Amino acid sequence: MKAAWYTSLGTSSVLQVGELPTPEPGPGEVRVRLAVSGVNPSDWKARLRGRGGSIAFPQIVPQSDGAGTIDKVGAGVDTTRIGEKVWVLNGQWKRPHGTAAQYIAINAGFVAPLPAGVDPAEAACFGIPALTAWRALTIAGGVAGQVVLVTGGAGAVGHHAIQIARALGAAKIVATVSSPEKAAIAREAGADATIDYRKENLGERVKSLTGGSGADRIVDLNISTNGPHYADMLRQGGAIVVYGTDEPMASIPAGAFIPLAPSIHFFIVYDLASDLRHMGMAEINALAAAGKLKTVIARRFPLDRIAEAHDAVQSGKITGNVVLDIP
């Protein structure tokens, strides 16, 4: 099969494209003939510096998300699943073989049916972006009737978070953005208001948009940048859900937090408990099938241009999701 891989950490120049053996599904696994692979920030970060600072396997086929068709099943999996159109998550989490290839063999629990009418390219972006957004909004009681602040509202996770928050009954959704173009994308997704964090004072704008009380929940992609401002944006007893950071260390306003009495929740989408993962996959499918969850596909690259795709995501200049089309 045709695939991309790397055998050492580094820039996108370490990526190679060529032929690898086609995997066979083991017990409890399905083999998916991939049509599209999603490219996420975690993919280039893992390629650049590994997970834990070293390369985990001698050869790694990158990327965790994708969509395609089941063409073979292993022992213990119902053969009626052969021919089923699906989307895939956790392809390259704690295993060497991800979705940047024509085929992947993976545990059936990480494969969800593709809802009728949903573009496979969009579904190839459900695994990390949409499932992260869903968990950030459902942890600690959910967001029904709440004011939700989504940082990075035009990003892959933020864009999904706005839509899911609306579907889950949030009373008001505020999103941070960095340009008028991104503000338009966030508003189209369902944000009631946007804040340009490069030009406006976050705390003052959030308080003005919430009658002085602050947000009930902050869904944050970068605690190392936003942590110092949490107390200015959160209401008394509010919740902060963190799913990312640019730096290994972060600061929060401890003195203000003690009387504010907030709760802070951290999670990584790859390690969700199986019951939560299946619940999230089902709810994402239901929203997508109902037309309530759309994905912005910003760029598409063929598999043999995977290095360009990684560089495009790493640049931070792409608004939306990047995918690889698998030949």
Image (cartoon, helix red, strand yellow):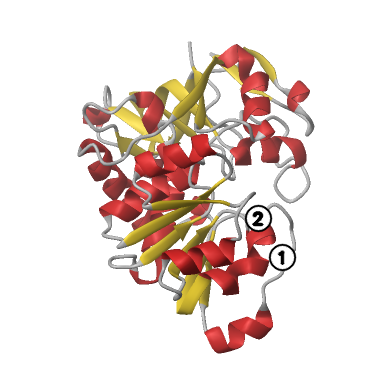
| For residue 168, above or below residue 157 | below
Residue located at (53% from left, 61% from top): 267
* Helix, strand or loop for disc 1: loop
Q: Residue furthest bottom?
A: 259
Q: CA distance from mark 2 to mark 1?
A: 8 Å
Q: Amino acid at mark 2?
A: Thr
Q: Amino acid at mark 1?
A: Ala
Q: Is residue 112 left or right of residue 94?
A: left
Q: Residue 134 or 92: which is nearer the viewer?
A: 134
Q: Is residue 300 left or right of residue 162?
A: right
Hey, which quadrant is residue 291 in on the image?
top left
Label number found at residue 87? none
Residue located at (78% from left, 29% from top): 11
Label number found at residue 245? 2
| For residue 53, above or below residue 181 | below
Viewer can see residue 90: no
**Residue beneath label 1, please?**
250
Hey, which quadrant is residue 19 in on the image?
top right
Q: How many residues crowd around disc 2 within 10 Å: few (fewer than 14), some, or many (20 or more)?
A: some
* Helix, strand or loop for disc 2: loop
Viewer can see residue 281: yes
* Contact, mark 2 vs mark 1 (Cβ under 8 Å): yes
Residue 37: x and y in percent read 49, 26
Q: Residue 214 or 201: which is nearer the viewer?
A: 201
Q: Residue 208 or 233: which is nearer the viewer?
A: 208
Q: Residue 228 or 118: which is nearer the viewer?
A: 228
Residue located at (50% from left, 33% from top): 320
Residue 89: x and y in percent read 45, 39
Of the image marks 2 and 1, the number of the one nearer the N terminus = 2
Residue 33: x and y in percent read 41, 20
Residue 116: x and y in percent read 21, 28
